Amino acid sequence: MIPLSWYLILAAALFSVGLFGVLARKNAIAILLGIELMLNAVNINLVAFWRYGSLASIAGQVFAIIVFAVAAAEVAVGLGLVISIYRRRNTVVADELDLMKW
Amino acid sequence: MLFIFAAAMTTLFMMDVEKLGRRGESYLLLLASTLGMNLMASASDLVMLYLAIETTSIPLYVLSGFMVDDEKSTESGFKYLLFGAMTSAVMLYGFSLLFGFTGTTNLYEIAAAIAGAQVSTVTALGVITLILVGLGFKVSLVPFHFWAPDTYEGAPTPVAGFLSTASKAAGFAVLVRLFFIAFAKNGLSPDWTTGLAVLATLTMTLGNLVAMTQTNIKRLLAYSSIAHAGYAMIGVVAFSDLGATSVIFYLIAYILTNLAAFGIVAVFSRVSGSDRIADYAGLSRRSPWLAMAMLVAFLSLAGMPPFGGFVAKVFVFAAAVKADMIWLAFVGVINSILGVYYYLTVLKVVYLYRMEGEAEESHPIPLTRPYGIALVVLSLGVLLIGTLFAPWFGASGAAALNLF
C-alpha cells in the first residue's frame, strides 16, 4: 500500500501550485482555477487521512463532500460576478479592476 | 441574538436604498447569511464550522456585488470573493491537517488530542497559522485586511455596515471558540497569544494611521473598523474569562455604533449621492438630528464617555492589564488617541464647516421612517450601553460561557 505521506506530499504540492496561481496570475478565471486547486488539495488530504485513520468514522468523507459542494457554490457566485464585471468593463484581468485604491 | 438584531437593523437601512430594497432576493441573502452567522457562533465541529463560515460568506459576496449596474459594486464583490475564497481555502487546509493529526473533527476531542501531546508544538502552531489566515480575513486583521476598504467603499452602504459588524462579530466568536477550546492546552497558549498580540498591535496601528488620510467616509469607516478589530483582539489575547466577556461586550457596543455610523452614511449618500467627507460640511444645519446621531456614533467609536465605545474599551484594556499585558493596553490607549483625531475631524466638518455660498436650510436631508426608527434605536442603544452597562456586561458574560 502506498504510504500516507505520498498523498500528503501530493496534496501539499497541489496546494502550493494553486496558491501560486492565485497570487501570480492576473486573469480572474485563472485565479478562480487556482482556488479550485487549493480546495482539491484539501480534499485529497481529507480522504487520505480518513483512509489511513479510523475507517469507522465517516467524518473525513463527509467533510470532503461538503467541501466540494461549497466549492461549486463559490465558483458559481465567482463566475456570476466575473460575468457582471465583464459586461460593464469588458475585462477579466484583475489588474485593471482598480477603481478603488488605498 | 446579536446577529439577528444586526440583520434587522440592516434591513431597515436597506428598505430605502434603491436597487436593493426593491429586490426581494437581497433580503433572502441577508437571512441566509444571518443563519450562517448563528451557526458559526454555535458550531463545535470542524465540518459544521466550515459550512457555517461559507454559508455566511457566499451570500455576502453576492450582496456586495449586488448592484450590477454599478462598476464599483461589482468590483467590490469580486475582490471580496477572491480574497474570501483564497483565505477560506488556506483555512480549510489547516482544518484538514487538524483533522488528520487528531483524527477527529470535534473541537473538544481535538483539544483532548492536542493536550494528550499527539501533536507536536511546531505542527500545531503551523496549523494555527493556516487557520488564522481564514479567520483573520473574516475579522479583517492586518495583514489580511486589503479587501476591507475596497469592499466597504464599493458595496451598497447597508451591506457594508452589515459586513463590518455582524460578519466581524461572527468571526470573533469562532476565533474565541477555536483558540480558547481547541488550542488552549499543552502550553500552546503563550505562543499564540504572543502572535495574536503582535497582530493586534499591527492591526490597530495601521488601521488608525491609514484612516487619518482618507477623504471618503466609507473608506475611513473601513479603516476604523480594522482598528476596532485590533482593539477587540486585545480581549482574545488576554485569554481569560474576563477577556472573552470583554470581547463580546466590545462587539455589542461596536455593532450598535458602527451600524449607526453606516446608517447615517447611507442616509446621506442617498440624498446627496456622495461619500466624500468634504461634502458633509453644513450637515448640522441641514439636518440637526442626523448630525446628532453622527455625534453619538463617532464619539462612541472614538471611545468617549458616556457612550458604549468607552466602556467597551475600558473592559478590553482591563482584561489586558489583568493578563499582565500592560504594554498591549498601552498600545491600545495610544491608538485610541490617534483614533480620536480622525473621528473629530469628521465631526468638525459636520458641525463647524458651512456649505459654500448656499443656505443650508434649503438643502434638508429628509429622514424616512425606517431610517428614523433604526437610528433612534441604535443611538439610544449606544447611550444605554455606555451608562447602564452592568446588565449588558452580565449578558456578555453569559454569552462567553456559552462559547465554551
Image (tube, rainbow, N blue to C red):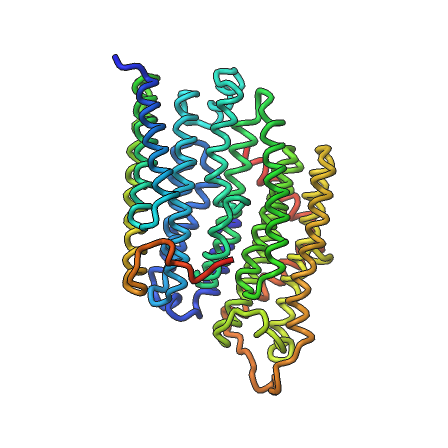
The image shows a total of numbered marks equal to 0
- Residue B394 in view here: yes
Q: Identify which residue, B251 or A40, lies in the foreground.
A: A40
Residue B191 in the figure: left or right of residue B130: right
Residue B36 in the figure: left or right of residue B285: left
x, y percent for residue B182: 52, 27
Q: Identify which residue, B283 or B315, lies in the foreground.
A: B283
Residue pushed farthest top? A1
Quarter of the figure that contains the C terminus of chain B: top right
Q: Relative to residue B335, is residue A54 depicted above or below?
A: above
- Residue B8 in view here: no
For the point 43% across and 60% down, the residue is: B155
x, y percent for residue B165: 53, 53
x, y percent for residue B168: 51, 48
Q: Identify which residue, B73 or B401, lies in the foreground.
A: B73
For the point 52% across and 47% down, the residue is: B140
For the point 54% across and 19% down, the residue is: B115
Q: Relative to residue A26, is residue A4 depicted above or below?
A: above
Q: Name the quadrant containing residue B94.
A: top left
x, y percent for residue B75: 38, 59
Q: Relative to residue B274, is residue B121 depicted above or below?
A: above
Residue B146 in the figure: left or right of residue A11: right
